């Protein structure tokens, strides 16, 4: 468990360092963006493999399925709602520009 946590933290620190070093040019930033996307896909795949390999989770899917769906729906809906309210409060349009009065 500690190894996994140390691995995730070291990857985050490496991403921060690479992005700080790449500010003057876009080439390194483009590379780090692709690297972060690949790392995210790898993490999601690993999480799915770990969850799928756990028999307790697979056998209890019928009971936790609706709860997981509702929690996901609430999280996504809440995120959309609060981003919409925050944009209206800060007067930002759909493209991220300030609305002129």
Image (cartoon, grey):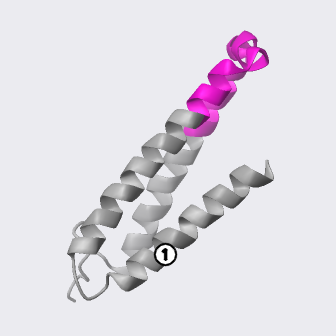
Q: Position of residue 53 (x, y in %)?
A: 67, 19
Rendered position, 70 above or below 32: above
Q: Is residue 27 left or right of residue 76?
A: left
Rendered position, 37 above or below 15: above
Badge 1 is on which residue? 16
Residue found 21% across the figure and 69% down from its top: 95
Residue found 28% across the figure and 64% down from its top: 31
Q: Is residue 88 magenta?
A: no
Question: Looking at the rendering, which quadrant does residue 64 occupy?
Answer: top right
Question: Looking at the rendering, which quadrant does residue 12 occupy?
Answer: bottom right
Residue found 68% across the figure and 28% down from its top: 67
Q: Position of residue 42 (x, y in %)?
A: 48, 41
Please give the count of numbered marks on the rendered protein. Answer: 1
Q: Tag 1, which secondary structure?
A: helix
Rendered position, 68 above or below 1: above
Q: Is residue 77 left or right of residue 25?
A: right
Q: Position of residue 4 (x, y in %)?
A: 70, 50
Rendered position, 92 above or below 63: below
Give, as a single range, the part of the protein colored magenta: 47-72
Q: Position of residue 24 (x, y in %)?
A: 25, 88
Q: Is residue 56 magenta?
A: yes
* Magenta: main secondary structure: helix
Residue found 64% across the figure and 64% down from its top: 9
């Amino acid at each position: 468990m500690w190894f996994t946590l140390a691995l995730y933290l070291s990857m985050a620190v490496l991403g921060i360092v690479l992005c700080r070093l790449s500010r003057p040019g876009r080439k390194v930033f483009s590379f780090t963006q692709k690297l972060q996307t690949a790392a995210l896909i790898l993490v999601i795949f690993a999480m799915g493999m770990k969850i799928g390999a756990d028999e307790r989770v697979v056998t209890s899917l019928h009971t936790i399925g609706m709860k997981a769906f509702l929690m996901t729906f609430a999280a996504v809906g809440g995120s959309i709602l609060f981003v919409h309210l925050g944009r209206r409060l800060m007067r930002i349009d759909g493209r991220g520009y300030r609305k002129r009065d």
